[in-house]
Amino acid sequence: MISPLNDVEFVLYSGLLVAPVNIQQYVWSLLWAADAEFIPALSTRHGPSDAIFDPAEKVKDEGPVEYFAEMSKQPIIVALSKGYVVGFMAYKTNYAVPEIQEKVQAYVSTIVIDPVARGQKIAERFYKRLFKELQKARDEEPLLVATRTWSTNFSHLTILKRLGFDCVFCKKNGRKKDIDTIVYKLRLSGSP
């Protein structure tokens, strides 16, 4: 496990393709290792925007190649500890989330934390870094952040609740039988 919180640096890239090659490789490795932790697995999806899932899709042997290619086009915040990527958050900017009738400045599509770094509040710190970046770039419009997750992703749900996100949509059995798809949004404080 890494030292508690104090040796993690957060670096923002406008897209993964502008990050150094070693960062791209670390992110790919983490994404592939976490593939089956997602419901459904990332390798069964075409990209981070997928909202409708086919429960018959099988995990692909080559890993989440399509998903990675699409995610690589998004801004990404990378958590580094002693030169190693211990997690990342990818998000879309100015994205139209069908379940939200307002402009969303950031739609968090993917968060992965290396198992050795979990429990260090890195995911929560990703969100706080994202909020800070959005506040710096803000105009007069309200700032909304949204994400889509599943009902048994308890660690993510806990973080969203702690940060003040509101549940705005729930699709029963949206991921598979007895696992719902849930959409959350947060209006950042100071937003009109």
Image (tube, rainbow, N blue to C red):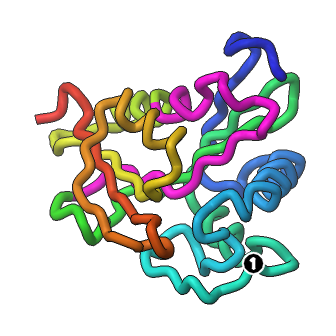
Image quadrant where one finds the N terminus: top right
Q: Number of labelled discs?
A: 1
Q: Quadrant of residue 6?
A: top right
Identify the residue shown where x is 57% and y is 34%. 123
**Residue 7 drawn above or below residue 69:** above
25 relative to 148 in the view: left or right: right
Neighbour class for label 1 at 10 Å: few (<14), some, many (≥20)? Answer: some
Q: Position of residue 26 (x, y in %)?
A: 84, 48
Q: Quadrant of residue 4?
A: top right
| Percent x, y of residue 7 | 76, 15
162 magenta-colored: no
Q: Is residue 14 left or right of residue 3?
A: left
Question: Is 119 part of what is drawn in magenta?
Answer: yes
Q: Is residue 32 left or right of residue 161?
A: right
**Observer-nearest residue: 36 or 131?**
36
Q: Residue furthest front?
A: 178
Q: Residue at x 40, y 65 (%)?
A: 180
Above or below residue 119? Residue 37 is below
Judge by depth and name the residue closer to the eye, 51 or 8: 51
Question: Please, which residue is most extreme toward the left here?
Answer: 192
Q: Nearer the viewer, residue 100 or 95?
A: 100
The image quadrant that residue 158 belongs to is top left
Q: Residue at x 74, y 55 (%)?
A: 34
The residue depicted at 81 percent of the width and 32 percent of the height is: 116
- Label 1 secondary element: loop
Q: Which residue is mark 1?
A: 59
Residue 154, position as x, y percentages in the image: 50, 43
Find residue 62 and report its horizontal and vertical position in percent: 86, 77
The amino acid type of the residue labelled 1 equals: Val
Relative vertical location of residue 14 with respect to residue 165 in this rendering, above or below: below
Instruction: Tell me the quarter of the image containing the C terminus.
Output: top left
The magenta-colored residue range is 103-127
